[in-house]
Amino acid sequence: MELHVALGKDSYPIQIQNTLLSKVTPYIEEIFSGKRIFLISDDNVFPLYGPALLASLEERYRCHHLVLKSGEPTKSFESLPGIYAQLAKAKMTRSDLIIALGGGVIGDLVGFAASSYLRGVPFVQIPTSLLAQVDSSVGGKVAIDIPEGKNLVGAFYQPKLVLIDPDTLLTLPEKYLGDGMGEVIKYGLIREPQLFETLRNHQGFHDLKGLQTEIIGNCVDCKRKIVEKDPFDKGERMLLNFGHTLAHAIEQYYDYKRESHGEAVAIGMYQITRLAEEKGLSPKGSAAAIKEVLLRYGLPYECGLPLEELIATIGLDKKNLNNALNLILLKDIGEAYIYPTDVNFFISDTIKTI
Ligand SMILES: NC(=O)c1ccc[n+]([C@@H]2O[C@H](COP(=O)([O-])OP(=O)(O)OC[C@H]3O[C@@H](n4cnc5c(N)ncnc54)[C@H](O)[C@@H]3O)[C@@H](O)[C@H]2O)c1
Ligand SMILES: O=C(O)C(=O)C[C@@H](O)[C@H](O)[C@H](O)COP(=O)(O)O
Ligand SMILES: [Zn+2]
């Protein structure tokens, strides 16, 4: 499947196809006429896919590479000096190309490094986790986490090309398939009721066999349409943040070391809907429907944190504009809306912990 993100001069193609990783050069050639490529990956992904990918690229390009420690803490300020130093050592210029090979951590971090080194070096996303294939590799949000909050330092910087090979999911550990399903369930809830129905009728990622590539395409296409209308997150794109106000606060609370992003989003979607139901802002029964599907995909719906512990971080949410906190709530399963409010929304007589 081929999709195209139409963003004027920042437009780019997305290829989704099995075994794609073994034949990337023609796709790279279409968007890049330079000579030098710098590939960045992590220490789980590189040993699996890096050597073969580099070998094929080296037939045509001069290649350099850097392997970073895997895990969310790598998506931090501390990783940047090392990346910039290696890019400088390789004499990378704005007419060269950076490739991010890995999950969302590598995509977000490398994308941010690419956006800032020389004020912008072109980059390509080759996502290898389910989460990165359905969500983070598309749309150009690149960022690092800081102790004060998730993704608080970043940029909008679109890749030149996204290459998605669902076969890489064969080596992805079960836990991270669950993480990706957190974002897949999000698409079902905000915009894709039929997808949600399909998810409701299956049990776990493996049970979706035969539908997996189609589901990845469905999610990417859903995100593509939203990003094309609102690339800079000023309105409709905020819907992609369903569950994320609480998710980001939970991740930050545990210093990005306990709940992974997909798990935190799962908890965030259920808990915000529970609060919204209590206030009559979402239909009764929607939180229960979310919980049922989360459990089917091995995802959590609570983490035992007192809500009041999260209020200060919620105040830093990026959807907070002109003193209004823009929450994303469900009008129905498959339809989300923006609800401008303030942190008092999170003060409830009955819901004290999430
Ligand atoms: N930019 C966006 O729009 C956006 C969207 C959603 C999430 N995110 C970000 O993405 C990050 C989470 O991404 P993630 O869940 O991919 O985490 P991750 O990058 O940490 O990858 C999860 C784990 O899987 C390993 N891995 C990846 N692909 C593999 C493969 N094919 N085989 C074996 N192991 C593999 C990684 O080494 C890592 O250990 C978070 O920082 C989140 O904020 C960004
Ligand atoms: O692309 C978007 O827009 C999203 O909100 C996708 C989210 O899944 C993703 O986690 C994103 O990084 C969150 O963005 P942020 O602006 O809230 O940091
Ligand atoms: Zn997310």
Image (cartoon, rainbow, N blue to C red):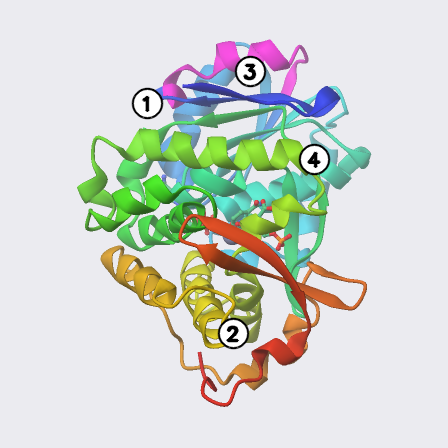
Locate the N terminus by quadrant: top left
Relative to 176, is 339 on the left or the right?
A: right
Quadrant position of residue 213: top left
Q: What secondary structure characterizes most of the magenta part?
A: helix
Q: Report which residue position mark 3 lands on.
A: 28
Q: The disc labelled 4 sits on which kind of residue?
A: Leu
**Disc 4 packing (10 Å; few <14; some 14–19; many ≥20):** many
Q: Report which residue position mark 2 lands on.
A: 254
Lower position in the chain sequence, tag 1 or tag 4: 1
Label 1: element kind: loop
Lower position in the chain sequence, tag 2 or tag 1: 1
Q: CA distance from mark 4 to mark 3?
A: 20 Å
Q: Report which residue position mark 4 lands on.
A: 87
Quadrant position of residue 114: top right
Lower position in the chain sequence, tag 1 or tag 3: 1
Lower position in the chain sequence, tag 2 or tag 3: 3
Q: Which residues are magenta?
A: 20-36
Residue located 57% across and 54% down the image: 337
Q: Which mark is residue 166?
A: none
Q: The disc labelled 2 sits on which kind of residue?
A: Tyr
Q: Which mark is residue 18?
A: 1
Q: CA distance from mark 2 to mark 1?
A: 36 Å
Which of the two residues, 80 or 120, is positioned nearer the viewer here?
Answer: 120
Label 4: element kind: helix
Locate the C terminus by quadrant: bottom left
Is residue 138 in view from this perspective? no
Lower position in the chain sequence, tag 4 or tag 2: 4
Label 2: element kind: loop
